[in-house]
Image (spheres, rainbow, N blue to C red):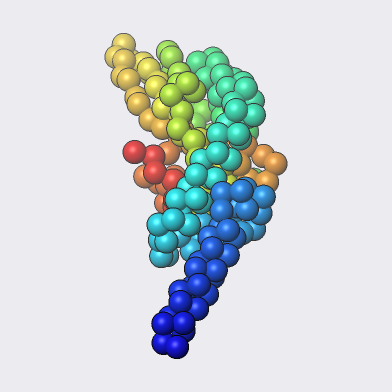
Amino acid sequence: MKKMKFLMAVMISAVIFTACGNKYSVDNLKKNDKLLKETAQKCKIKRNEKICINVDKVQAEKAQEWWNKTKPEITKKVDKIAKDLMAGNLMSSMEFVPEKLWEWEAKHASTTPQKAKETTLQILKEAVKQIKFEKVEYKVENAKYGQTSAGRNYAIIPTKSIVSAEGNQAEINQKSLVFEDGDKLYVVNIDEKNKAILKEMYSDLADVKAE
């Protein structure tokens, strides 16, 4: 009798485990975005090795699909930014900055988003009078891409600029973050200030590792 009870308990456990495992299978996670996001959030708190490996796999596949689809558009955007910067035109780079950034600037400067944008543009215009962008290169082919726990797709693009001022040249190596917000794509440099601001505006971007 005891042996029978033990066997039944084992069978029930196996059925429960299988059902749970099937729920979080790669195929199910691919089909159910809500389940994928919920599970990705749970994996941030407590990692179940098998389930979270499935989450990682699905997110990687979805990010790959997104990158393949949007790479031409992203390439076009960053090429325009590079070309305009070398021509001394800052407007295209400003166009791809999220509106939430101007809202953040406005909040901390006690002004309006539009005024914050205008002030930043004026500061940059004055800076461009002193320096010249000799070269701006977005290394799209070396980009790393992924998906945050909230399901936001992103790419990190190594970026190199050569600037000159008063007869001297300097090479600046940075990383640019391309990410989606709804149906829009934004491009921002990842420096310490922007990292902090972005995490405040988009908490899931804390998942992004630029290193």
**Depicted 167 relative to depicted 43: above or below:** above
Q: Residue furthest bottom?
A: 1
Residue 125 % position (x, y): 51, 28
Question: Does residue 1 appear left or right of residue 181 in this picture?
Answer: left
Question: Does residue 143 appear left or right of residue 80 in this picture?
Answer: left
Task: Give the camera-side residue of 100 and 204.
Answer: 204
The quarter in which the C terminus is drawn is top left
Residue 167 % position (x, y): 31, 11
Residue 71 % position (x, y): 59, 26
Q: Residue furthest right?
A: 183
Task: Give the camera-side residue of 83 and 44.
Answer: 44
Residue 100 % position (x, y): 59, 50
**Residue under the point 57% across and 31% down:** 67
**Residue under the point 50% across and 78% down:** 8
**Residue under the point 46% across and 84% down:** 5
The quarter in which the N terminus is drawn is bottom left
**Depicted 41 relative to depicted 161: above or below:** below
